[in-house]
Structure formats: structure tokens, C-alpha cells
Image (cartoon, rainbow, N blue to C red):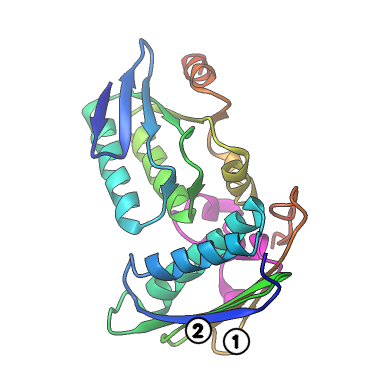
Amino acid sequence: MSDKEITKHFVVKSVYGALEEPRQWLLSQLRQYDYSENDIFAIHLALEEAFYNAIKHGNELNSDEKVRMDYVIQPEQVRILMTDEGPGFNPENVPDCRVGENLYKTEGRGILLMKSYMDEVRYNETGNSVEMIRYRHPDESLAPKEKVPKR
Amino acid sequence: MAEMNPRITVEYDDSATIVTLLDEKILEERDVRQLESSLISLIEEAKGLSLVLDFSNVKFMSSAVLGLLIKVSKRVYEHQGKLALCAISPKIYEIFKITRLTKIFDIYPDVQDAVTGLSEQ
């Protein structure tokens, strides 16, 4: 297991499929750093959700617009910064997908999952950049229970 | 056993249609769309379908699949059918729990339980 920090960034088009290389790089590094399967699952899921939001909602699938991913991998934590070129949004205005009719909607669960599986999730003021951090967890710990309170 | 669009296999039991998802990781939008296409075709071919979705191969999926399942469930019910999910791994089940979708899907440990469960509905 490496005891050093590694950083890398990717800039990709806002198209489905563009995450392939950044995803594979990240997953291979997580294995090199000997992160548990639970940590890898959690970080991978948050990555997928954040990327989908960036290209679909942030950049509206405009392939001329880019998404930048900055990874910082350390022995005890993994940090991902995902930035799109869209106008941003207020994450506080996203309806709770677990409540009422929202439960039956086909979208809107990404942020909940990001917050449930990562230890820290922060948006910048504009709302077009999200920072996610997961600390190395003991092996049995996957997702905190009920981490995100229902509104 | 019929294989369709290399994403699923379909088996016909006396009382249910069992669809096994073949992919370990359901990641890309095109994968989800292909899966949707396969499932919707099945549903529209048969009114009153009792459909069991077997997740035993699935090790990773994003919330896009949850959205697909909601679409599929709506279509099943529109066609007077029934839907059950089964053999969901603990990690994947956690995603259903966190999003409270355990409240709207009937989830069983295995195919046999799912078939029995649907026949008793």
C-alpha cells in the first residue's frame, strides 16, 4: 500500500461514456492503496452519481461543455472534486426523493447517494462544483445509516 | 432460455417470467437504455405478466437503474402485471434502503421466493 499522496485530473466532454478512463484510473488507484471493497464501492457510486449530475444537469449533455475531475488519493482519504461548466444550482432546493410522490420519480437520487456514501459533500457557492471526501473506513462499514435526514 | 440484447436472459416458469440481469456492472447510460428496451418489449408482449427480475449477477449499479426499475414497474402495472425483484446483494440492497425504494418494490431473497410471492398476490 502506498503511503504517498497522488493527484490527477481529467477533463472530459459531457457525454455518457466519457467517464470510462477517469473511472478506471480511480478504481485501480484505490486498489493500489488497498482501500476495502466497501470503500471502493462507495467512492465509485458517488463518482458515477456526481458525473451523471454534472453532464446531465450541469452541462445539459452539451458535448462542447466539459467536466473536470480532480482526484487526491491519500492513504487515509480520497477526495474528488467534480466541476461542470453549467450555471450551477442550489442543492438545498433539490426535493427529498424519499418523500411522497418523489419516491416514484425516475430521477433525483444522486445527491442523496453521494451524501450517504461519502463522508463529506460540499458544493461551491455557484453549485457547479462538488467536493466529496471519503475517509478510509473499517471493513464492515459501507454506508452510514440514515445519514441524510428526511425533510 | 432466451438471451436478449446480451443484457438479460429470460426463462418462463409456469406462473412467472424470470428475467436474469447478466451484467455485473450496470454503468453506462447506453447499458441502462438497452436494458430498458429489452424489458419494455417483454412487458408489452404479454398482458398480466408476473415478472421476476433476478439481480444475482449484479454487483454494481447507479441510481439510473433505480429510475429504470420505476419506469418498468409503472409499465408492468399499466399492463395489469406484477413485479418482484430478487437475489439483490447486500451492497445493492443498501442503495434501495437508502432511497426508500424498499417501500415500493417487492424484494425477495431468491427466484423461487419471488415466484411464490407473486403467485400469492
Residue B70 falls in which quadrant of the image? top left
Give me the residue at 47% from left, 49% from top. Answer: B66
- Amino acid type, callout 1: Asn
Give me the residue at 59% from left, 49% from top. Answer: B95
Depth check, front residue: A11 or B120: A11
Question: Left of B102 or right of it: where is B19?
Answer: left
Using the rendered image, report if marks 1 and 2 lie on a common chain.
Answer: yes
Question: Left of A86 or right of it: where is A6?
Answer: right
Give the answer, above or below, for where B51 lies relative to B8.
above
- Which quadrant is home to the N terminus of chain B? top left
Depth check, front residue: B25 or A32: A32
Boundaries of the magenta span: A91-120
Give me the residue at 62% from left, 39% from top. Answer: B90
Question: Looking at this rendering, what residue extends furthest in the top direction?
Answer: B14
User: Is there any visible trace of residue A90 in the rendered image?
Assistant: no
The numbered mark at residue A128 is 2
Q: Which residue is mark 1?
A: A124
* Mark 1–mark 2 CB contact (< 8 Å): yes
